[in-house]
Amino acid sequence: MTDLMWPIISAGIATMIALIAVLLFWKIHKERKSGFPMQDERTSKIFGKAATYSLYIGSYFIIALLFAFIIGREFYDLPDVDAGYPLVASLLVYNVSFLVLRWYLGRKGE
């Protein structure tokens, strides 16, 4: 990236983080004012199941990624991969699988 683009992108990232934080606090404040509990037994169970399943999915993804890198390096003489892209990919797999599973289990009912 050019030297001019980096401060603009950094400011955009900081703005997005601040916007997400404001929306999250607004949602929490709105739910507290409604008088209903934020989590009951059902939602706690759904969150627990979704977290457990996403942990398994993410762990298996990382193991498969490591095997692919090892096989590529040892048998096909592929160059080593920087750590940034696999870390971002595994973080996305963890988070997206948790969100999808939480949504699915919430719709399914258990």
Image: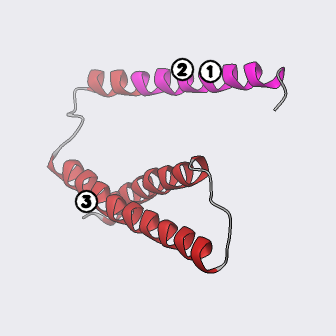
The residue depicted at 17 percent of the width and 44 percent of the height is 40
Secondary structure of the residue carrying tag 3 is: helix
Q: Residue flagged by tag 1: what amino acid is it?
A: Thr
Earlier-in-chain disc, 3 versus 2 = 2
Kindly give the residue lying farthest to the bottom in the view shown: 75
Magenta-highlighted residues: 4-26
| Position in image of residue 38 (x %, y %) | 24, 35
C-beta proximity under 8 Å, tags 1 and 2:
yes
3D distance between C-alphas at marks 3 and 2: 30 Å
Q: Residues within 10 Å of mark 3 (few under 14, many from 20)?
A: some
The N terminus - image quarter: top right
- List the residue tagged with mark 2: 18
- List the residue tagged with mark 3: 49
The residue depicted at 32 percent of the width and 28 percent of the height is 31
To which quarter of the image does residue 109 belong?
bottom left
- List the residue tagged with mark 1: 15
**Left or right of residue 7: residue 49:** left
| Frontmost residue, 91 versus 78 | 78
Q: Magenta stretch containing residue 14, yes or no?
A: yes
Q: Magenta stretch containing residue 60, yes or no?
A: no
Q: Residue flagged by tag 2: what amino acid is it?
A: Ala
The residue depicted at 45 percent of the width and 63 percent of the height is 62
Above-or-below relation of 95 to 62 = above
C-beta proximity under 8 Å, tags 3 and 2:
no
The residue depicted at 23 percent of the width and 54 percent of the height is 48
**Left or right of residue 10: residue 46:** left
Earlier-in-chain disc, 3 versus 1 = 1
Secondary structure of the residue carrying tag 1 is: helix
The C terminus - image quarter: bottom left
Above-or-below relation of 5 to 56 = above
3D distance between C-alphas at marks 3 and 1: 33 Å
